[in-house]
Amino acid sequence: MLEELKKDLSFLKNKYHDTAAPFDPFFRMAYHGWPGDASTGFDDAEMEAGLKEYIAALPDTAHVIIKAKAFAYILDHMRIGIDEHDYFPLLYNWNRPLRPLLVEPWRLSREKSKESAHYLWKYSKSGDIAIWLDYDHSVPDWHALYALGFPGILARARQYRAEREAAAPLTVDQTAYFDGIEITYEAILRLIARLRDYAAGCSFPKAAEIAACLDRLTLGAPETMYEQLMLIFLYWFISESIDVFQVRSLGSGLDHDLFPFYTRDLESGRYTAEQLDAFIGYFLMQFSAIGNYWGQPLYLGGSHRDGSCKVNAVSYRILDVYDTLGIYNPKIQIKYGKNTPDRFLETILDMIRRGHSSFVFICEETARRTLLDRGVPPERAWDFDVKGCYEYAIRAGEFSAAPFYLNLLGPLVRALNETGDDADYAAIEARFYANLDTLFRGGIEVCNEIESVLREVNPSNMLSATITTSLARARDAYHDGAECNTTVILTSGFGTTVDALMALKKLVFEEKHCTLGELKQILAENWSDAALRVRALNLPQKFGCGDGEADACAKKLSDFILSYQGTPNSRGGYYKIEMHSARHYIVFGAKTPATPDGRLAGEETSKNASPVQGMDRNGVTGTIRSALAIEPWRYWEGFGLDLMLHETAAKGDEGLAALLGLLRAYDAAGGSSVQFNIFDAETLRDAQQHPDQYQNLQVRICGWNALWRDMPKAEQDKFIERAENLL
Amino acid sequence: MTGIITDFKRFAVHDGDGIRTTVFLKGCPLRCLWCHNPESLIRRPQLAYLTEKCIDCGACVAACPKGAHQFGENGHTLDRTRCDGCGDCAAVCTAKALKFYGREMTVDEVMAVVLEDRIFYGTNGGMTLSGGEPTAQAEFTLALLEAAGKAGINTALDTCGDAPQPLFAALAPHVDCFLYDIKHIDSDRHRALTGRPNDRILENYRFLAGTGAQIEVRIPLIPGCNDDTATLDGIGAFLNAAPPRRVKLLPYHSYADGKYAALDLAPPGAALTFPDAAQMALAADRLRRHGLNVVVG
């Protein structure tokens, strides 16, 4: 069957791509490559026109109902198909073309106060902040979905409704909440039945298998691993593309989730090991085919409650198939700890050094510690979900929206401009922290305001139905119906800010190479003094080098940032901080003028908890020591660290042992998330000059991977610059 | 007590087991044609100057009390005859064009650096003393090894073996693993290639092996110098009598050419060639015929 998969790869790779059009890696979603079977439903234009007309004719009612009905309309009219080269169906409406009709931006702008609007305008324009309503960090209760299937989820919601109705009449909001779920899941079941019937009418060999699988899902819970994978795929596709909620983990530990089904399939003789491998392969290719820029996460590993490791035969099968396919999406997070077998970690590390850099290691103990620290009961903290890039949350109990990105350099640039030329370092530093405080407080106020309409703008009908606390409260799970509804602030440019503060202190006040006024002028002229810039770049006090003075500065900044953690949000939860910049190290960097550390105007800033590109001069151990100095275990949402190693450091048995040693050491010392890029600069330079010869060269960007050939040259240059310092 | 330190290398993963910090001590009795650490050969401090990094800021001129740095029509020039190795110029060179080799450090100072990375050493990583030749600074080397032992740090000693046997007897109890160089089996040829005969080196090997010391033998493979069958068989037969736990074949490379240039030295092995992967594999196979555990580094 793997041979069959190999023959089908060409179709799978291009499932959603219009291969005639240039591929744009920054475009959030890919394209409809599949023209669709016109007899089964509308194309984009027909769907949009039909939906507009349909919505216009609906009576004025709660948006949760309107969205559910619009959702049902799309599912009932979308083009569907199955193909002889695939075990998973084709669904037409990828790429969220109908998002504007499903979410309610008008309500957001209506609810926003003038003060918030002004604040957003002022600080977004300057590149200090970015704030938007976030629906991109959901993980359903996969265990409930496996146990109940789509019909069972609907039946359970009806039961919760009946029990509540028996106790007291439902309020208007509660009625809308349950109606929304029922309309949504009835539509999902109709769609699956439609797909089943379509498959039943096809005559190619895979069709009968597909029809039987879909038939099972119309009746209840999945019974085989293939049915389970189909359920995950359908939930994911429909939620991401129609319900407008990104699903940020495929399963709650995919290896652990699949294992009972996998074992049963083998023991019963229903499928061979090779057939099961192939199903895993077809499943993984669905996400590889989409190719969205952020990558689709899933995680493996972790521990059982008794402390034993969850790594099992399926963990290795997933890795092996992934390795064979040579893909980088889905991206895979590895929950690891003392009990994780060396062999499992070495298998992954070996893949990484061979170019599969789309793995992130998450220290399980540290992540659990953050949950306990914020008061999550131990019985809920032991089994957390890893989601998105590096984040962790109570499984099936916590939804953290991430609406607020903050550029730490903005307040420093303004502090320099706002203080007189006779100011001392302490005065500038105080002004920096005051400016930072203004940003945090102001941003939190805006987030509180806009998040108060989170559920009205985009109610989470699909998600809510899977979450029991949401059903019991009849409240939207993503908004305030879960055990914990948190809000995340993501900080960007940490390393650059520390380096800039240290450079300011050294150049002007301690070593006195220039006056404050001169430095301001030089920065205004985008580092017009080249010699001084070299001096700034070569200062030893850099974050990420294990330098005591820089690390002390970093600790002070980190403590300040963390002081906003725990601030109540407007949804009954609180704020969490994540040391993660996503793509904002580029976005903010483009708007940030030259900074005292030697960075030129518009250049990217440092990302995550990592040093400025090229400034990790004391190697990986220095980088890790600096990261540990700011206590990763205090960051409740996550803490990303990128390590770059020269390939000579990773070669042979000794190299593999060293990589494993780094992982073990980072975990033992309280590290959080870590990812590797293993290169030599010469390869990267060659790849820049001969992209055709490096079609598959991928690099870890910032929580996701990108193909080297798709990266802008400036970003490539920064990678090369950093790699050059590795020998 | 102080020693003269050339440099440190953190996250050293090919200098013994696990993750290590390698301390390079300055001074070596050998003059190998292929030496890749020319900054470690002599004990006195040295200044390296990387022309391409100089930004002509003139900070070195002001810092140098001896007038070794000058600026003329051709920009910066360095008169090494005036340099007394104080290192003041390198300290002010923000462009990192000047690098000072030969810092005098106490045992505590060295150990402070080594201990910074302690969390990475795990069960088998630790400190490696290399050079130059650590035994050339015998007392300091012994003191460092003792200090590491007290701190519970695993130790490795990278040595050419050319030191008095009583010294090895004194060092052995404090060394978890010797990284022991065998460069040639024929003493005359050894002298021609390294400036010293190998009799003492081979004798010390036998002695250490007899004590039960853990030894990894390292053989730098240089085509035309020591890759012929007779030489490899000679080394193989010698080691077979007291096999080390591993033999590591290291391919000669010319990465050090930049360092020679920065020190105004001519690379003595300019005419040497590099082994390719096939040559390395062939040599490894030849040594394996003598029952040795051989890896290519």
Image (cartoon, rainbow, N blue to C red):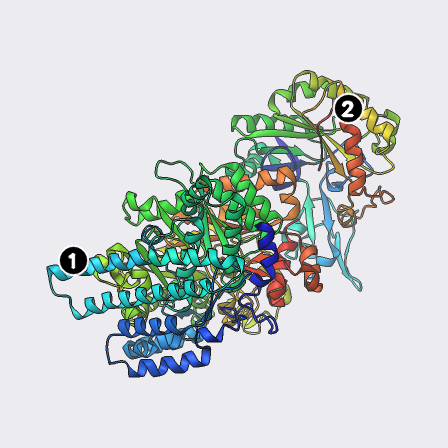
- Disc 2 on helix, strand or loop? loop
Residue B145's tag is none
Write the residue at 24% across / 68% down: A179
Q: In this view, does B69 lie above or below B182?
A: below
How far across and down, in percent of the image, does residue A158 sit?
22, 60
How far across and down, in percent of the image, does residue B12 sit?
62, 40
Q: Which quadrant of the figure has residue A412?
A: bottom left
Label 1 Cα crowd, 10 Å radius (few <14 / some 14-19 / many 20+): few
- Disc 1 on helix, strand or loop? helix
Instruction: Determine which residue is flagged by label 2.
Output: B290
Instruction: Determine which residue is flagged by label 1.
Output: A163
Question: In this view of the protein, can residue B93 be seen by the observer?
Answer: no
Write the residue at 43% across / 47% down: A258
Q: Which of marks 1 and 2 is in front?
A: 1
Q: In this view, does A200 lie to the left or right of A522?
A: left
Write the residue at 58% across / 25% down: B146
- Mark 1 residue type: Glu
Q: Which chain carries label 1?
A: A
